[in-house]
Image (tube, rainbow, N blue to C red):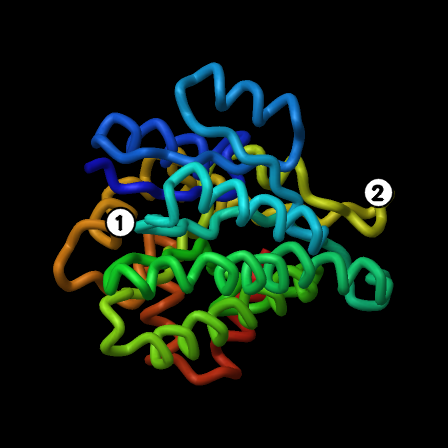
């Protein structure tokens, strides 16, 4: 029997690359997108398209119902990959923008996961994997709102992993670092006259979206999946530096343009 996997944020980038790869590996892929035209494109590509707006509680509930029907209440894995970034100094981020950032990157993810979790618990096995970010490990000027949502996702993930210990459901995080996708182009800038730009070093170390596939496969298929999967060299470097370097020194490093 095919194992069913739901992937959110499938319209492009990491989600789309994951959908095609897992389909080729024999999974039944449920591909969730926010826009109706992207859902139709997923259907035409042989996936089960699911319309999902993580910022809309009713949309999340409806999507979860569709998922459970499509997989006959036997969902094996959930790849929480949907999200976006709000960039701008904190003085320019409104409460509404902050709430929408958390609504999409955390609250919707939480709601969707909790709606699907009972069917996974009933099987006694499964995988919950979420896309975090280097910004879930460090925070820099102009990215405070996005980083805060990813820090929160990391904490949420840790709590979920402890709560599901012994259930047969394994919980992992993928921490990509700079990936060459449409993410940056789709960032919501709070000030278009002074957009927050990624440092040049990020572009030099960027990898294609397919770089996340080996970690994703391991998280899905290994008997002993890791808790966290840094992907790019920058993600690995930040992971190590946070453990070894004092915070004051890290601040100096992160302020270098």
Task: Decide if residue 12 is on the left or right side of residue 222.
Answer: right
In the figure, 145 relative to 163: above or below?
A: above
* Residue located at (23% from left, 36% from top): 2
What separation in Å lies between label 2 and label 1 (alpha carbons)? 35 Å
Q: Quadrant of the N terminus?
A: top left
Number of other residues with Cα within 10 Å of mark 2, as a class: few under 14, some 14 to 19, many 20 or more? few
Q: Nearer the viewer, residue 69 or 13?
A: 69
Q: Who comes first in sequence, dot 2 or dot 1?
A: 2
Number of other residues with Cα within 10 Å of mark 1, as a class: few under 14, some 14 to 19, many 20 or more? many
Q: Of tags 2 and 1, which is closer to the observer?
A: 1
Task: Decide if residue 206 is on the left or right side of residue 171.
Answer: right
Task: Decide if residue 153 is on the left or right side of residue 223.
Answer: right
- Residue of label 1: 215
**Where residue 250 is drawn, which disc sits there?**
none
- Residue of label 2: 192
- Furthest-left residue in this view: 223
* Residue located at (54% from left, 70% from top): 151
- Furthest-top residue in this view: 44
Return the x and y of residue 251 as percentages of the image width and height.
55, 75
Q: Find residue 144 and report its image quarter.
A: bottom right
Return the x and y of residue 186 as percentages of the image width and height.
67, 38
Task: Decide if residue 249 is on the left or right side of residue 244.
Answer: right
């Amino acid at each position: 029997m095919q194992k069913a996997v739901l992937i959110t944020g499938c319209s492009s980038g990491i989600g789309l690359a994951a959908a095609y790869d897992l389909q080729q590996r024999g999974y039944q892929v449920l591909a969730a997108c926010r826009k109706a035209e992207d859902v139709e494109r997923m259907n035409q590509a042989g996936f089960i398209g699911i319309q999902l707006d993580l910022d809309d509680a009713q949309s999340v509930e409806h999507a979860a119902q569709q998922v459970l029907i499509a997989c006959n209440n036997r969902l094996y894995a959930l790849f929480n990959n949907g999200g976006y970034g709000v960039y701008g100094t904190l003085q320019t981020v409104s409460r509404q923008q902050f709430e929408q950032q958390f609504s999409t990157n955390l609250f919707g993810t939480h709601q969707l996961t909790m709606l699907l979790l009972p069917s996974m618990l009933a099987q006694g096995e499964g995988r919950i994997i979420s896309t975090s970010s280097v910004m879930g490990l460090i925070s820099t000027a102009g990215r405070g709102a996005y980083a805060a949502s990813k820090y929160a996702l990391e904490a949420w993930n840790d709590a979920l992993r402890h709560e599901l210990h012994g259930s047969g459901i394994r919980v992992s995080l993928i921490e990509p670092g700079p990936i060459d996708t449409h993410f940056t182009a789709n960032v919501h800038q709070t000030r278009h006259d002074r957009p927050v730009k990624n440092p040049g070093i990020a572009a030099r170390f960027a990898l294609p979206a397919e770089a996340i596939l080996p970690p994703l496969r391991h998280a899905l298929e290994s008997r002993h999946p890791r808790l966290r999967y840094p992907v790019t060299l920058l993600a690995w470097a930040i992971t190590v530096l946070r453990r070894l370097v004092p915070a004051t020194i890290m601040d100096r490093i992160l302020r270098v343009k």
